[in-house]
Image (cartoon, grey):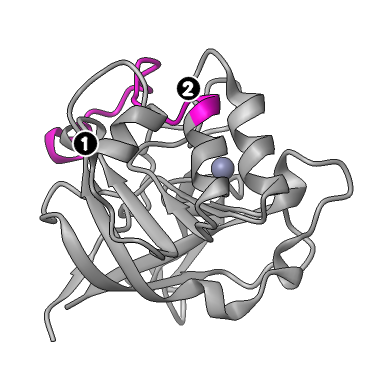
Amino acid sequence: MDIHDISLPLSNDLPSWPGDPRPRIKRIHNISEGDDSNVTHLSMTAHTGTHIDAPDHFLDSGETLDQIPLGLFIGPAQVVELPSGRDITADMIQEADIPAYTKRILFKTRNSQLWQQGVKEFQKDFMALDEKAAEYLVSRDVEVVGVDYLSVAPFRAPKATHQILLEGKVLIIEGLDLSGIESGQYTLYCLPLNIPEAEGAPARVLLGR
Ligand SMILES: [Zn+2]
């Protein structure tokens, strides 16, 4: 099986959401400086780099990480490449000819080029799902949606898209790098860190085929 790592390497250079603290990864013990071992200290939000959003992120008293069925994290997934545009729209998804009964969809857009190019500054004009697109995915009984920038919703309107998906029991994976992936069917392996009561968590995400 070919295995592709579609998660972003965690580093101090990762763009972070405007207003949120940047990730900090720092060596605090060094063998070369006389310590017994090397130890790295991490400090970051749960929404750093490649991560998942649990319902509690945008719904008051929504489900937290420990309440998400583990079965969502592993299984068949469709990578769908979309034409460039301002937003991901319901029409665009309809025209993409996604096989019926697809439960996990990862959208590859122009955003993935930003990761390939190593753009470190946060980009506000990333492509994300508008409200109608979110409603359409819920109506199709999709269970997992992945996107290739740091939010599933457009920067100017974060709330509606998140709320519609999370109320519709759709797990959200954000911050995927799909630049090296062609469209088609894969097996998704999405393993968020086990932070039981959190509203999200960084995740290692792999595609196998
Ligand atoms: Zn998030």
Q: Which residue lies furthest to the right in this view?
A: 61
> Is residue 17 in sight in this rendering?
no
Of residues 39 and 15, the one drawn nearer to the viewer in this rendering? 15
Image coords of residue 180 (percent x, y): 11, 53
> Is residue 115 in sight in this rendering?
yes
159 left or right of 141 in image: right
Q: Is mark 1 within 8 Å of ligand 1?
A: no
Asked if residue 5 is positioned above or below residue 208 in the image, the reply reads: above
- In the image, the segment drawn in magenta is 114-132
Which picture quadrant has residue 101? bottom left
Question: Which residue appears at 31% of the width and 45% of the height?
Answer: 107
Question: Which residue appears at 32% of the width and 58% of the height?
Answer: 7
- Say which of marks 1 and 2 sits in front: 1
Asked if residue 58 is positioned above or below residue 80 in the image, the reply reads: above
Q: Pointers 1 and 2 in contact (CB under 8 A)?
A: no
- Residue topped by disc 2: 154
Q: Is mark 2 on a helix, strand or loop?
A: loop
Q: Which of marks 1 and 2 is nearer the N terminus?
A: 1
Query: Is the residue marked by circle 2 packed among few (<14), some (14-19), or many (20+) residues within 10 Å?
Result: many
- Residue topped by disc 1: 82
Residue 170: image tag: none
Question: Which residue appears at 54% of the width and 55% of the height?
Answer: 52
Image coords of residue 139 (percent x, y): 56, 47
Q: What residue type is labelled 1?
A: Leu
Image coords of residue 205 (percent x, y): 36, 66
Query: Is the residue marked by circle 1 packed among few (<14), some (14-19), or many (20+) residues within 10 Å?
Result: some
Q: Does the residue labelled 2 lie within 8 Å of ligand 1?
A: no
Q: Is mark 1 on a helix, strand or loop?
A: loop
Ligand 1 is found in the corner quadrant, namely top right
